[in-house]
Image: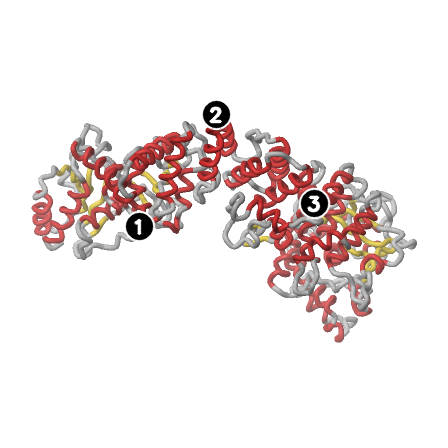
Amino acid sequence: MNRIESFTSFTQMFERGQAQGDVITRVEIPLIQRDYAQGRGGERVEEIRQNFLHVLHGAVATPDAEPVGLDFVYGELDSEGILYPLDGQQRLTTLFLLHWYLASRSGNLNIDAGWTHFSYETRPSARRFCQRLIRATPPLTVDHLAAWVQEQPWYLFVWRHDPTISSMLVMIDAIHKQFSGVDAAAAWCRLTDTARPAIGFHLLPLPDMGSAEDLYVKMNSRGKPLTEFENFKARLEKTIEWSPRATEFADKIDKEWLDVLWMLRGDDNTVDDAFLRYFEFLIEVCEWRDDALCSGIGSSIITRATRVLDGENPRAPEHLDFLFTALDIWVNRDVAGTFEEFFGQSGLPLFFRAGTRSKSNLFESCCRSYGEVIGSNRRTFTLGQTLLLLAVITHLSEETVDFEARVRTLRNLIEGSQSEIRADRMPRLVADAVALITKGTLPEPGSTFAAAQISDEEDKRIFLSALKDEERDDAVAILHRLEDNTLLKGTTSAFYLDSPNGLAMRVEAFSAIMTTPELWPNFTATLLTFGDYQWPSGRAGKLDDSDRFQFGTGDKQAEDAWRQVLVGRDRTDIANTADALCACLDAVAASSEPLEKTLSDLSTAWLSKQETNNTFDWRYYFVKYPAMRLGTSGLYYAEKRQMGFGLTNLPRGKSQRNAYHFDPYLSSIHYAAGEPEGVESLALFSGYESNPRWLRLTRSQVGLRSIPEGFQIDRPAEEECDKRFTASVASLGISITDVDDPQYIFRIPKTTDDASGPDAIDRIVVGAKLLNNLLAAGF
């Protein structure tokens, strides 16, 4: 008998010459099993039912579709070939109903076929229902199949109280809805294909178990059946019987390991859930470490544990040793105290999202929430936490050296690789994390942690290694302070690693500014006076060839904008940001004035220089006018992929270019004019950055918009109004071109011949005067 690789179909397992492994003469759902549940009501069950049938439909209705595997089916096989399923009841029942449906519709329903020998022993009524159903052939024109079944003379009225029959009827209608449009004959052929069946599973008969109840219903002193965990434990003990450590496992799980988890007991004074979650963590780590396996998320924990620990898996001894180690290390240890030492108030700060339970005690968090998901399949106990918990286990079990520094590096790599840490990458991430903790080696860039963060960690090591011994301790403390900043979360690539003293002054200035959000509006302006610090986050990723630009923000609620600017790039790509940031911080550190005055003085001095040179570029307007920075997301889209005079500025929480947005120039003109009435709302525009955005006067609908040359004017059509309009514009002394066009150009003098280059006068001042002139003229 092939114990575990017996991949078979529902029909094959009943037929000699075709069965992959033992031949089944009959399937009987034993009394110890629950009722059929896949047909129950409730939104969650309905979703599971629909998703399952959708998968089955794709397998049988699509030619050349990949076969669908339904994991393992376990059960006791007696000497007469009767299979009593212990795991797989729900899937087998659904397959039985699907076979009946397609067989009856394709003319292949034969009560002597082996697959019809399927029965429920949970109640006599359910057994009788299965027997009668396989003799029933509904007309092809029936719309409501369950109703037709209930109208048959053999259907007993009292069956309406049987939950298994009720669930089967719901599933029958669901199958009919999903499969009524398929070619039943072709689908039946694919379903029963002996060479390549559309749907199959691994059949694992378990002989010589005595009574199934010995495994499934070990009775406690009050005669109650096993809990889910006790059932898992019993099956796991059976799975690892090949190992000399099987007896040790059974002993420890009821003694030493139970004592470890007792602190996590629930209101029912059991630790079952905690055990199951920790075991799931251990099993998944083994799956990631075993090239022959893949993560079994979605399968039952016992199915996954069997794949990992079954004696036929060559790496099962290694996995079992890891399981023992990962539990033994907590015996007689102050678990909470251990994690407090590593990650508590005086240890390494962890930056996991707010609300994570027992944030520093990763063992407790794992036992309380591993395997839970929130939102769109987001893990409650994150993959990053998983790597850190594995790091602690590795350190404690192997007594690694320099753990404080190595786990800090791992923390930094995790925080700097949020987009890279995905379930499909975990095999490589696990291997690299363990190598870092045991050997101190950094990962090689590739399908692992973010290359930019790996580069940053290497840069830090080079910086520290070049220092003298007496300097190194102080430099390490400074680096740690920088890494632990809640905006940077381990990344230092925006800072020069040139000298301990220089770094110390910049860290002090940066910390003072970033821990005072009231300074951020000024800082966003002052920082820009030192250079183009913004991150070109669009498709090109270069300042002169990008369509989206991320700046810092003055809004504490949108502080992630600063993280977008300061992390995620290596020192080559972030050079512009680093140059501006470090020069600004050096200037701040050199000042003896209060921070607010220092930032203001730096901005004022730069603006004065620009005004003296009559150079008014987009940076000038950003620094001088707070309304240019009105959208607190710090995110801008630029026409023609160049920061200039055609920009959209997104509010907090928005990131898409077609989202509602501000026009920073029009907003600034309106503010500079004193926010006069008679102007249509400038709060939010819509569309792309290339779409025209007009500041319109409510009464006349006269409009103006910012363009590189100056302003485009949408003037009134009436001749009399146009005379007043021309006089209002002419009073500003600015040349007008294309005067015969209803939308003509109001040109702003330039410092060069480039129409897109810097202005020679302040366009915001001119625009504000123009707006007030038009309103004063009655427009």
The reply to whether residue 64 is visible in this rendering is no
Q: Secondary structure at mark 2?
A: loop
Q: Which residue is mark 2?
A: 468
Callout 2 environment at 10 Å: few (<14), some (14 to 19), or many (20+)? Answer: few
Q: Residue at x 72, y 64 (%)?
A: 168
Q: Residue at x 39, y 31 (%)?
A: 501
Q: Residue at x 65, y 58 (%)?
A: 49
**Does residue 641 sit above or below 105 in this rendering?**
above
Residue at numbered disc 3: 329
Give percent across and percent down for residue 166.
71, 68
Amino acid at the residue labelled 3: Ile
**Closer mark to the observer between disc 1 and disc 2:** 2
| Quarter of the figure that contains the C terminus | bottom left
Q: Quadrant of the N terminus?
A: top right
Q: Nearer the viewer, mark 3 or mark 2?
A: 2
Q: CA distance from mark 1 to mark 2?
A: 57 Å
Number of numbered discs visible in the structure rendering? 3
Left or right: residue 18 compared with residue 467: right
Tell me the tag on residue 445.
none
Q: Amino acid at mark 2?
A: Lys
